[in-house]
Image (cartoon, grey):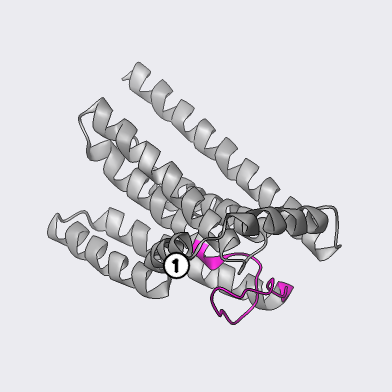
Amino acid sequence: MYLKRNKYDSHRKRLFALNILALILFVGILYNVRIDGFLIQIDTWVNQQISTLHTPTLTQVIIFITNLNGVVGNILMGIIVIIFLTYKKWYDACRFYLFSLLGSLILFAGLKQWVARMRPHSELIEVINYSFPSGHATLSMTTALLVYFIFSPKSTSMLSKNILLMVCIVWPLFIAFTRVYLNVHWMSDVLAGLALGLFWVTFVKLILYDKNT
């Protein structure tokens, strides 16, 4: 019992540290963008470099992948996950998923309107609305963390846990890359989106869904 409690306390400390680091990163990027700081020059340079990677075939693949994590894709995945969690009678996990996902949607949508940052000009796809933070990056990080937090404790195999962890790390990073590749976001937009998703889900888990597992 004592060892289990120590493991739980250590888990909470790591989760809290991750939450604070994500918040600091997001606030730092937000502040730098608002004052037109050094990140603006880095954003421009990164987009110029990535444009050299463009090919017609790669662009079509990237568009297909990035659309998987759009609003429609997240709604469809959310429905599937919620049906599964309800079927398994994991009601706490279902509430955790819904609250976190809806919170992320509200956060990034509200921040977009407040910051009102213009997107870079893209000749590859047409996207409306403001740029900061990236909704795709926010939602991909949110979804990846939710999947990991909900399903990892259910797994009895270390191999499956490690595979799930790798997928949940690579997926949001790759989605973030697709947004910069398509030139519909600046690098700081996607980094802020990833940090926002990380902050929000860890916050919800700490406050509402952190259990001794």
| Residue occupying image coordinates x 78% and y 61% | 33
Rendered view: 136 above or below 129: above
Residue 67: give x, y in percent of width and height. Answer: 41, 69
Rendered view: 195 above or below 13: below
Q: Quadrant of residue 177?
A: bottom right
Q: Quadrant of residue 32?
A: bottom right
Regarding residue 124, the answer to whether it shows in the image is: yes
Residue 82: give x, y in percent of width and height. Answer: 25, 64
- Label 1 element class: helix
Q: Residues in magenta?
A: 115-136
**Residue beneath label 1, please?**
63
Residue 132 vs residue 102: left or right? right
The quarter of the rendered structure image containing the C terminus is top left
Q: Residues within 10 Å of mark 1 (few under 14, many from 20)?
A: some
Q: What residue type is disc 1 on? A: Ile
| Residue occupying image coordinates x 36% and y 75% | 72
Rendered view: 166 above or below 136: above
- Residue 17 painted magenta: no
